[in-house]
Amino acid sequence: QVTLVESGGDSGQAGGSLRLSCAGQGSIHNMRCMAWFRQAPGKEREQVAGINNRGNPTYADSVRARFTISHDAAQKTLYLQMNDLKPEDTATYFCAADRAMLFRTSLVPAEFQYWGQGTQVTVSS
């Protein structure tokens, strides 16, 4: 049994920063890939960033150079540092993990087995 719990979502101004956390509980070891996705109202869930079990990251073009994904295996926690936030970053952010999928630059939500419940990020201009 694997549980992912996100935290850190908040409301803020454009240009600000937030750090999201995703704490893994249960049999969280040996995940081949962990990732952050986001979903805005009326839009499809989209990739934000992913990281494989070797620490290699991938980012959506819209967040590259502003967001940083990291994973602390000892703490069983995935992070997303978000800087220079923009109103278009407003969404519910979800963390996801999977043991079997092949890591690549473009990640698809359907390939992830485990999901958190989401945390809301709202950025005002």
Image (cartoon, rainbow, N blue to C red):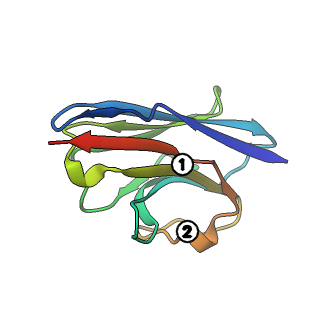
What's the amino acid at mark 1?
Arg
Rendering quarter of residue 22: top right
Front of the two marks 2 and 1: 2
**Residue 90 visible in the displayed image:** yes
Residue drawn at the location 21% of the way across and 31% of the way down: 16
Kindly indicate the quadrant of the structure image that contains residue 5.
Answer: top right
Name the residue beneath numbered marker 2: 109
Query: Residue shown at 53%/51% (left/top)?
Result: 94
Structural crowding at the residue carrying mark 1, measured as other residues with C-alpha within 10 Å and reported as few (<14), some (14–19) or many (≥20): few
Residue at point 48% right, 68% down?
107
**Who comes first in sequence, dot 2 or dot 1?**
1
Residue designated by label 1? 54
Q: Is residue 60 left or right of residue 77?
A: left
Residue 114 drawn at (x, y percent) = 69, 56
In the image, residue 114 above or below residue 9: below
**Vertical relation: 3 (above or below) 114:** above
Q: Position of residue 44 (x, y in %)?
A: 44, 71
The C terminus sits in image quarter: top left
C-alpha span from label 2 to label 1: 20 Å
Q: How many marks?
A: 2
Which one is in front, 110 or 117? 117
Q: Is residue 34 left or right of residue 27?
A: left
| Res 64 seen here | no
Q: Percent from the top left, x then y, of residue 49?
A: 41, 54
- Residue type marked 2: Pro
Residue 81 or residue 7, whichever sits in front: 7
